[in-house]
Amino acid sequence: MQRMKRPATRKRRLKSTEKTQTINFGPLPHYLGYQIRQAQAAVFRDLMTSIADIKVTPGEFSLLAMLDVNPGISQVDLAGVYKLDKSTLSLAVGRLVKRGLVRRTRSREDERYYALWLLRPGRLLLQRMRERVEAQERTMDAVLRRGERRHLLDMLQRISRALDH
């Protein structure tokens, strides 16, 4: 196993009246799941900071992006893509509808389902979000060597498929 560059212990700053405490992470830094979660948390923290003025969550960005390239997709199909129950997705879509970003109409093919459409304000907001997301992608690319991005994406997709039950 390759050695980790990051030590398994860190010091955290306490109040000025307390001593610095060393925290032992044990085997955590050697677990893929732990490192993937740490990276994901860092990406979300950074993204939330850069999009605070836009007032869109990363999850809402993802929904808007999917609707942009899948006009008229049913809420059921979208819930399947995200592996969410219909009620959870319905709440998120409802917030986007209330904000005038998305239109929800009964499907022409099957009136039991709702079809979703990205409206012009949603498309404009999505463009602003994409600019921020792409800036973040460039920051991440800057720490990767040539070809590593492609390999990293491939590895993450294989892990996702292996664990997707």
Image (cartoon, rainbow, N blue to C red):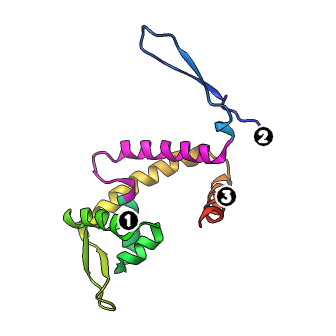
Amino acid on which the number 3 mark rests in the picture: Met
State the residue in front, 73 or 71.
Answer: 73
For mark 2, does the 10 Å Cα neighbourhood hold few (<14), some (14 to 19), or many (20 or more) residues? few
- Residue at 65 percent across and 37 percent down: it is 29
Q: Position of residue 23 (x, y in %)?
A: 58, 24
Q: Which residue is the extreme one toward the bottom?
A: 109
Could you tell me which quadrant the C terminus lies in? bottom right
Amino acid on which the number 2 mark rests in the picture: Gln
Task: Check whether the beta carbons of the residues at disc 1 and disc 2 lie within 8 A of each other.
Answer: no
Q: Which residue is mark 1?
A: 63
Q: Which residue is mark 3?
A: 155
- Residue at 25 percent across and 76 percent down: it is 104
Q: Is residue 128 left or right of residue 35?
A: left
SS assignment at label 2: loop
- Is 120 above or below relative to 141? below
Amino acid on which the number 1 mark rests in the picture: Leu
- Residue at 62 percent across and 30 percent down: it is 25
**Residue 36 magenta-highlighted:** yes
Q: Which residues are magenta?
A: 31-59
